[in-house]
Amino acid sequence: MKNDNEKSVGWYRQAAEHGDPCAQFKLGLMYENGRSVTQDYDEALKWYKKAAEQGNAEAQWKLGSMYCYGWGVSEDAYEAMRWCMMSANQGNAYAQNLLGNIFSSMQEWNRATEWYWKSAVQGIVRAQNSLFNIINNSSECRKHLVRNFGDEIKNYCQAAVHGDASAGYCLGMMHTIGLEVSHDDTEAVKWYLKSANKGNVPAQSALGWAYAIGAGVGLDTSEAFKWFLRAGEHGDTFAQLQLGYAYERGNGVGIDKAKALEWYTKAAEYGFAEAQYQLGIMYSSGSSINYKEALKWLRKAANQGHRDASASFNLLRWQLHIDC
């Protein structure tokens, strides 16, 4: 396995050095997360920047994230905004969600709402939750969203009725948060199921969550696991987090700590703070103890404002008598 990982790094490096932006992004991701290489934020920044300057949207988002959270570089709100905006304008849902977070921190709620909407309709659950909180606490933000995206909302409704899977997911999401349609979990599940059966990944993830919590459908952890697995295998980070929970705790599947680590890692490497936190906790206790990895992941989650991760990081650092 080690030789295979070394070969993979070698292939990515060779392609990256020849200017391939996708390989440059992958190499940056490896260095950021210490995956098959020693973690090195300077190297991550270098390769992300090379890819970002060639227009790679994922690298632009990651570069913006590093400037936003101060990973290996001084925090720089201007650079964070600049790179995230480039990525978001290319449709990157993670960058759109991060812009929503940035504008929320600036209390520019209308602009935050716009970016959360763009991210939410692509299936980013964190954006959907943030959008729900804002529009249900501010009638002005709700009006602003409808005023600016009213035609798009109507189009989703019409396209969903005509069988469009992406629109069906969006209509389900609108029922979940009660935007321009009734807040109705049962109706939401109906649309999620139609879209999920057509292969729509966000709908599969949303359907898994509905079964996991019994929203609009009977609670069924086995069904939840089935849909999370379909979505997780296609890169949905929320589903990957839930698969980590499932394997760690035996929700709808037998307990398998190794697979829990595997799924948490997939979501964590794409910046999901809760997955980073869970990964840090697993590495700090039980049969998977690796304090270096635990501190690494807890720090990354804490830097994104995850309070439990911050507390766990400080406690572990104190227990290990580490000053960092």
Image: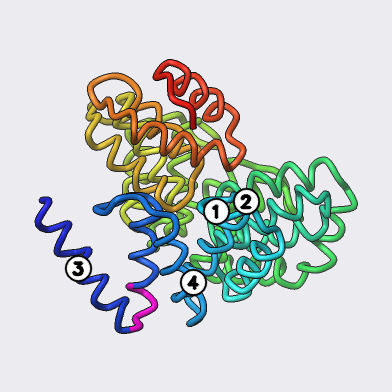
- First of labels 2, 4 by sequence position: 4
Badge nearest the viewer, 2 or 3 = 3
Residue that label 2 marks: 127
Badge nearest the viewer, 2 or 4 = 4
Three-letter residue code for mark 2: Ala
Magenta stretch: helix, strand or loop mostly: helix
Region rendered in magenta: 19-23
Give yes or no for contact between labels 1 and 2 (Cβ–Cβ under 8 Å).
yes
Measured Cα–Cα span from mark 2 to mark 3: 36 Å
Residue at left 56%, top 48%? 125
Measured Cα–Cα span from mark 2 to mark 4: 26 Å
Three-letter residue code for mark 1: Ile
- First of labels 3, 4 by sequence position: 3
Tell me the element at label 3.
helix
Measured Cα–Cα span from mark 1 to mark 2: 5 Å
**Towards the viewer: 20 or 204:** 20
Give yes or no for contact between labels 3 and 4 (Cβ–Cβ under 8 Å).
no
Three-letter residue code for mark 3: Gly
- Residue 49, which numbered label? 4
Residue at left 67%, top 69%? 82
